[in-house]
Amino acid sequence: MQGKTGIHDPVAYHAWYSTPRGSRIAGQELELMLKLLPFKPGEKLLDVGCGTGYFSSRFTDAGLTVTGLDPDPAALGFARKLDQRIGHIQGHSGALPFTDGAFDHSAAVTSLCFVADPARALEELWRVSRKSVILGLLYRRSLLWLYKAGRGSYQGARWDLLDEVRQWTQGLQPTPEIRAGWTVFFPSGGAIAQRLDRFIPDSLPLGGFLVVCLYRRSGF
């Protein structure tokens, strides 16, 4: 999770993904995003707000050709060293430096939680994507919100609801088809939380991580 002012210590930030809790949560988040993302190996994906590049690398491992974009030069420097399979560009979500339909897909994994105008950012993501846009968001009606809202690296983050995300899509052309799912129902670490999470369907709107995928119907 990166704050509004960027990632102050990219090494420490990225190390969280190697902790038992970080690895579990990130794994659940990735699993749901890949489930909803309608991609084929070799297709191009833009990772907006890529930070230190953890999810960029995981999307690449899944077979996508990934470009990472972030406004933070320190995070990008770390990401470039981490994974040279990925192209990295400095830029902002509100004005993406790409032509219309330059990518098959685009992703924003918790980065829109720190964007003041998420509707504008989503408009840009939709513009550069020929097939789909996938969003990873913090969900307000969750245990994660109760435990973490306003604390630590979550300070300054916005916690969204699906109805609010639907409002961001108003005016997008063509009108997207929207699918959503939730995960990270029990954010505490440990094997018990992981087992409990596996019993809950991702259609239940109580998880701390909300995944929303916007599809262009003509793309399939």
Image (cartoon, helix red, strand yellow):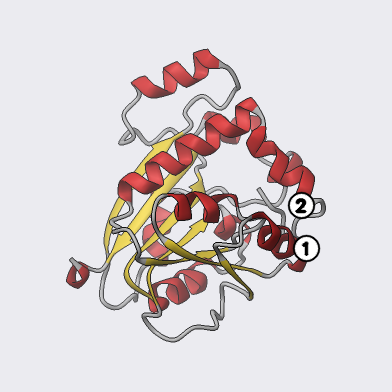
Of 107 and 120, the residue lying toward us = 107
Tell me where residue 122 appears, x and y as whole percent. 45, 69
Tell me where residue 64 appears, x and y as whole percent. 40, 59
Is residue 209 left or right of 180 when viewed as pictured? right
Q: Residue furthest right?
A: 8
Which residue carries the number 1 mark? 74
Is residue 33 left or right of 186 when viewed as pictured? left
Marker disc for residue 26: none
Few, some or many residues within 10 Å of mark 1 (<14, 14–19, 20+): some
Q: Quadrant of residue 171?
A: bottom left
* Residue visible at 33% across and 54% down in the picture: 37
Tell me where residue 170 appears, x and y as whole percent. 35, 70
Few, some or many residues within 10 Å of mark 2 (<14, 14–19, 20+): some
Tell me where residue 115 appears, x and y as whole percent. 61, 64
Marker disc for residue 10: 2
Of 98 and 126, the residue lying toward us = 98
Kind of residue indicated by mark 2: Pro
Q: How many marks?
A: 2
In this rendering, is residue 131 above or below 147? below
* Residue visible at 46% across and 35% down in the picture: 28
Quarter of the image containing the C terminus? bottom left
Q: For mark 1, give the secondary structure.
A: helix
Q: For mark 2, give the secondary structure.
A: helix
Q: Quadrant of residue 86?
A: bottom right
Q: Residue furthest bottom?
A: 99
1 and 2 marks in contact (CB < 8 Å): yes
Kind of residue indicated by mark 1: Ala
Q: Residue furthest top?
A: 192
Of 204 and 1, the residue lying toward us = 1
Is residue 164 left or right of 6 when viewed as pictured? left
Separation of residues labelled 1 and 2 (CA atoms): 7 Å
